[in-house]
Amino acid sequence: MAGRAARLVLLAGAAAVASGSQGDREPVYRDCVLQCEERNCSGGALKHFRSRQPIYMSLAGWTCPDDCKYECMWVTVGLYLQEGHKVPQFHGKWPFSRFLFFQEPASAVASFLNGLASLVMLCRYRTSVPASSPMYHTCVAFAWKMDYFCASTVILHSVYLCCVRTVGLQRPAVASAFRALLLLMLTAHISYLSLIRFDYGYNLAANVAIGLVNMVWWLAWCLRNQRRLPHVRKCVAVVLLLQGLSLLELLDFPPLFWVLDAHAIWHISTIPVHILFFSFLEDDSLYLLKESEAKFKLD
């Protein structure tokens, strides 16, 4: 035990200059994983592991080495806490208490609720707004992308939605060219992260930069039209709330009760923001529909 404690102290001192996550660099963790895999993940021991593994775990793709890493993670966390050190990360993530086959149960539930809120509001939008509204198809496409693609796609599509609302209704060709540019940017972004290097810092910086463009553009349009269009106050609230809540993503602390981290809190906090944004889209689409019908009658 003294030898393990000494290695923990040395590791804590060298953490600032070493690469990788602190927990999975720890020799105690690596030795534990190696011994666990040798003991449980081959031959008859592997058959025994598979026979006693719950079916939902195997269907979710949890393997014997994965289980060893999970168990050894908690062994290492226990040693760190026992010696008075801060909780380390493992493979770029904080330790979470697994529930069923969910490694991050709070984030999983929060993501599901986010998707459910978006689906409910999408159904409401499609019921209350006729398909003839100028923004109908763009808003529906935004809703589906928000549920099925990554954060970068959501932000870029919000920028595109803003372009359509501020410029594209009068100049469709400009909106189409801008959409092609955004798709090219997204393709390059995903290709770099997938094929060259997954750089978390770059990904965060890129999303923050696009998020600032999205915020400034929407706010400029809202401030310009706040007297003429009272419902833009909802859009202002959404933009400011999202920017404020995004600070949660920049926080970095061990999960509360080994379940609730900043990312999960961010997901939960944005649920009412999605509802408010769809309410704005509904009001704005109905306004545009009335405006287009009025112009048609005048013509």
Image: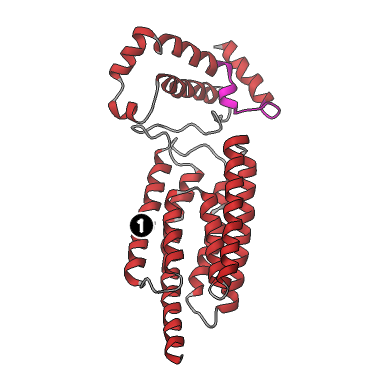
Q: Residue placed at 46% from the left, 90% from the top?
A: 299
Q: Tell me if I can see residue 209 in this picture.
A: yes
**Stretch of the chain drawn in magenta:** 15-28
- For this orientation, the residue located farthest to the right is 17
Q: Is residue 176 left or right of residue 299?
A: right
Q: Is residue 276 left or right of residue 81?
A: left
Q: Tell me if I can see residue 197 in this picture.
A: no
- 1 vs 20, nearest the viewer: 20
Q: Residue placed at 50% from the left, 64% from the top?
A: 238
Q: Position of residue 214 (x, y in %)?
A: 59, 61
> What amino acid type is highlighted by mark number 1?
Leu
Q: Is residue 61 left or right of residue 184?
A: left
Question: Residue 24 in magenta?
Answer: yes
Where, by quadrant of the figure, is residue 179 drawn? bottom right
Q: Residue placed at 53% from the left, 60% from the top?
A: 158
Per the image, label 1 sits on a secondary structure element best described as helix
Q: Is residue 155 left or right of residue 41?
A: right
Question: Residue 102 in magenta?
Answer: no
Q: Position of residue 243 (x, y in %)?
A: 57, 58
**The N terminus lies in which quarter of the figure?**
top right
Q: Position of residue 233 (x, y in %)?
A: 51, 73
Residue 167 drawn above or below residue 11: below
Question: How many C-alpha atoms fall within 10 Å of the one at disc 1: few (<14), some, or many (≥20)?
Answer: some
Q: Position of residue 21 (x, y in %)?
A: 59, 28
- 133 vs 77, nearest the viewer: 133
The residue that label 1 is drawn on is: 119
Residue 89 drawn above or below residue 299: above
Q: Residue placed at 37% from the left, 48% from the top?
A: 112
